[in-house]
Image (cartoon, helix red, strand yellow):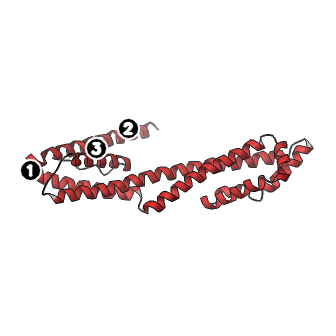
Amino acid sequence: MIPKLNSRCRTTETNTASDNLLMAFNKQTFEGDNYIGGLFTNLQTWTGLLGTAIYRGKVESNLDELDVARDEKVQALNYLLLGATHHPIAEIKAAGENLFDTYMKYGLKIINETYAIESSLIESLLQDLSAPVLQADITAVSGCTEVIADLQAAQNNFKVANFAWEEEKAKEGLTESATQIKKEVVSIINDKIVVYLRAMQQANGAVYGELAQTVSQIISDANQAIKRRAKKDKEVAIEN
C-alpha cells in the first residue's frame, strides 16, 4: 500500500518529495483521466509557492545576518571613537571628541531601530562623516578610516539584499509562510493523490501501477530520511 508522507517533514523535505512526485507523474500520460491531471496541477501550483516561500525564508535569514554585520560596525565605530576621546595625545583626543560628537547624534541606539529606519540613520551618519571638515580628524584617529569604510560596505551589502527581498515580496505577493504552505502540500499528497492512487492501483493496475509504485517509493524514501533525522536529533539531545 502506498504510504502517506510523514507530517513531521520539514518544508525542504516536503518540497523535495513533491518535486519528485511531479517528475514521476510527468513521465507518464493518463489520457481521459482529467482528475489525476488536476490533482498534480494543483500540487505543482502549491509546490511552486512552497519553493518561493522557502527561498524567501533564506533571503530573510540572510538579511538578519547582514543586519547583525552592520550593527557590529556601528558598535566598532562607537568604541573606537569613545576610546579616542580619552587618548593621551591632545591632538588625537581633540579629533576623537569632534568625531564622537558627530557620531552621538545617532549613537548605538540606531541598531535597535527597524531595518528601514536604521538604514536611513546609517546613511545620514556616513554622510555627516564625509564632511570635509572632519577628514583630518578621521585621519588622526588610527583605524577610523578603515572602520568607516567597513560600515559603508556593510550598509551597501544590506541595501542590496533588502532591495532584493522587497522586490521579491512585491513580485510574488505571497503572504503565507512556508510552514502554512507545507501543510497544504502534504494534504494534497496524502489526502488526494495517495488516496486516489491506492484505489486506481487496485482498479486498473496496468495503467496506474507504475506511477503508484514510484509514488510509494518516493514517499517511503522521504519518510525514512525523516526517521533517521529524528533519531539523530534525539541522540544529540540525549548527549547534551
Three-letter code for the amino acid on which mark 1 is drawn: Gln
The residue at which mark 3 appears reads as: 223
Three-letter code for the amino acid on which mark 3 is drawn: Asn
Three-letter code for the amino acid on which mark 2 is drawn: Lys
Quarter-wise, where is residue 122 in the image? Answer: bottom right
- The secondary element bearing badge 2 is classed as helix
- Residue at image x 92%, y 44%? 90
Q: Tell me the CA gap for discs 1 and 3.
A: 23 Å
Q: Is residue 190 above or below residue 175?
A: above
Q: Is residue 229 left or right of residue 91?
A: left
- The secondary element bearing badge 1 is classed as helix
The residue at which mark 1 appears reads as: 202
Whether residue 234 appears in this view of the structure is: yes
Q: Position of residue 239 (x, y in %)?
A: 44, 36
Q: Nearer the viewer, residue 37 or 114?
A: 37
The residue at which mark 2 appears reads as: 232
Quarter-wise, where is residue 230 in the image? Answer: top left
Number of residues whose C-alpha sits closer than 10 Å to that of mark 3, classed few (under 14), some (14–19) or many (20 or more): many
